[in-house]
Image (cartoon, rainbow, N blue to C red):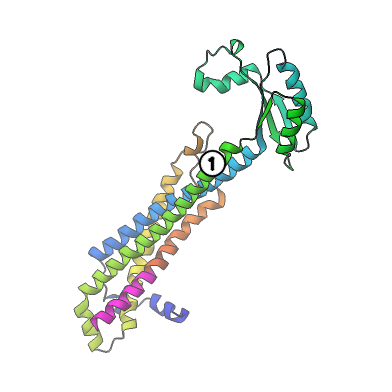
C-alpha cells in the first residue's frame, strides 16, 4: 500500500464516515479492547524493562563479588586467614578483600538459625569477602595458588547460583516481550471481528453505495478511518490509566527485592506513549484487510 493511499484513507471525509455507525456494539468493543490491551501492554513493557535492569544489576554485582571460605582447625584459622588476605591483596583484579567479623557472619546465618546461634561453640568457617576490579582476576589461577599456600581455603565466585538468577531475569524479560506480541495479536483479532460485524451490519448500505458508483476503496476507507480513530482513543486512555497504575507501584528497595522497582525510569517513561500509535497501526492494518476481504465477499 503506497503512502498516498494511506494518506487518502486517513483523511477526514464526513460523507464517507456516515457509512460506519458512530456508536453501538462495534464502537464500544473497539474502544474497550484497545484500552484494555494498551493497559496490559504498559505493565508488560514495565515488567520487561525492569527484568532487563534486574538481570544487568545481578550480573554486574555478582560478577564482582566472591567469597573465600577458610576451613581449618581452630588453631590455624587466624594464620590461614592472614595468608589468604596477603595473597588476595597481591592478586591482580582484586579490588578489595576483608575478613568478615563474627558479628557479620552471625548476621548472615540469622535468617536460617535465628539470632541466638552460638558461633563460638560451632565450627563455622572464616569468610573473606572479595570485591573484583577491572580487569577481572583469574579465578582458576587464584584457586591453584590458594590450594598450594592456604590448604583450607575454598574460593566461591558465586557462578553456580549467579547464572541461574541472570537466566531467570532474562527469561522473564523475554516472557514480557512475548506477552506484548500476544497483546498486539489479540487486539488485531478483536478489531477484525468488530470491523467484520460493522461491515455485515451495513451490507445494505454498502450495496446502495456501490449502485451509486462508490468504489470499494472509498467504502473501506470509511471503516479504516473510524476504527483507527477508535483504537487510537481507546489505547491512549488505556496507556494513561496504565502509567498511573505503574506510578503507584512501590519503588525499588533492598527489603522488597525484585518485587519492587517495576516501574519506568528516566526516558523509559516515553516508551508507553508509543503504544497508542502502534495500536492505531494495528487497527489500520486489521481493518483494511478485513474490509477488503469482506467487500469481496459482498461483491
Q: Quadrant of the C terminus?
A: bottom left
Query: Which is more toward the observer, 57 or 21?
Result: 57
The x and y percentages for residue 8 are 41, 80
Q: Quadrant of residue 93?
A: top right
**Going by the image, does 159 lie left or right of 43?**
right
Q: Residue at x 58, y 39 (%)?
A: 162
Q: Is residue 95 magenta?
A: no
- Residue 81 in view (yes/no): yes
Query: What residue is drawn where x is 39% and y is 52%?
Result: 40
Q: Residue at x 38, y 62 (%)?
A: 185
Query: Is the N terminus in the top left, top right, bottom left or bottom right quadrant?
Result: bottom left
**Residue marked by disc 1:** 164
Counting labels gives 1
Question: 33 left or right of 169?
Answer: left
Q: In the figure, 185 relative to 126: above or below?
A: below
Provide the secondary structure element on which disc 1 rests.
helix
Determine whether, in the image, residue 95 is placed left or right of residue 244: right
**From what the image shows, is residue 78 above or below residue 138?**
above
Magenta segment, prevailing SS (helix, strand or loop): helix
Residue 127 lies left or right of residue 170; in this view the side is right
* Extent of the magenta region: 284-299
Quarter location, residue 97? top right
Q: Residues within 10 Å of mark 1 (few under 14, many from 20)?
A: few
Residue 21 appears in the picture as rendered: no
The x, y position of residue 108, in whole percent, is: 57, 23
Q: Residue furthest right?
A: 90
Q: Position of residue 150 (x, y in %)?
A: 74, 25
Residue beneath the point at 69% across and 33% down:
131
- Where 85 falls versus 189 (above or below)? above
* Residue 215 on image: x %, y %: 31, 86
State the residue lying farthest toward the top: 121
Amino acid at each position: 500500500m503506497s503512502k498516498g493511499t494511506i494518506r487518502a484513507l486517513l483523511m477526514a471525509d464526513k460523507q464517507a464516515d456516515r457509512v460506519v455507525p458512530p456508536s453501538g456494539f462495534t464502537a464500544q468493543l473497539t474502544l474497550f479492547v484497545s484500552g484494555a490491551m494498551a493497559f496490559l501492554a504498559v505493565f508488560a513493557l514495565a515488567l520487561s524493562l525492569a527484568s532487563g535492569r534486574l538481570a544487568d544489576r545481578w550480573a554486574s554485582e555478582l560478577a564482582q563479588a566472591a567469597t573465600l571460605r577458610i576451613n581449618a582447625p581452630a588453631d590455624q584459622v587466624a594464620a590461614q586467614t592472614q595468608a589468604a588476605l596477603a595473597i588476595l591483596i597481591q592478586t591482580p583484579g582484586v579490588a578489595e578483600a576483608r575478613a568478615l567479623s563474627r558479628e557479620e557472619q552471625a548476621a548472615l546465618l540469622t535468617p536460617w538459625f535465628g539470632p541466638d546461634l552460638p558461633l563460638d561453640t560451632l565450627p563455622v568457617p572464616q569468610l573473606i569477602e572479595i570485591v573484583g576490579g577491572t580487569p577481572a582476576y583469574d579465578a582458576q589461577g587464584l584457586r591453584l595458588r590458594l590450594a598450594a599456600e592456604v590448604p583450607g581455603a575454598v574460593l566461591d565466585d558465586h557462578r553456580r547460583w549467579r547464572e541461574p538468577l541472570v537466566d531467570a531475569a532474562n527469561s522473564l524479560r523475554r516472557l514480557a516481550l512475548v506477552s506484548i506480541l500476544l497483546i498486539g495479536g489479540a487486539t488485531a483479532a478483536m478489531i477484525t471481528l468488530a470491523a467484520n460485524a460493522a461491515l455485515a451490519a451495513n451490507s445494505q448500505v454498502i450495496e446502495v453505495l456501490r449502485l451509486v458508483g462508490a468504489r470499494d476503496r472509498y467504502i473501506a476507507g470509511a471503516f479504516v478511518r473510524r476504527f483507527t480513530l477508535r483504537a487510537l482513543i481507546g489505547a491512549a486512555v488505556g496507556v494513561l490509566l496504565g502509567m498511573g497504575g505503574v506510578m503507584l507501584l512501590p519503588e525499588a528497595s533492598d527489603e522488597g527485592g525484585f518485587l519492587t522497582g517495576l516501574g519506568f525510569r528516566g526516558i523509559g517513561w516515553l516508551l508507553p506513549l508509543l503504544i497508542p500509535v502502534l495500536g492505531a497501526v494495528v487497527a489500520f492494518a486489521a481493518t483494511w484487510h478485513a474490509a477488503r476481504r469482506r467487500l469481496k465477499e459482498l461483491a
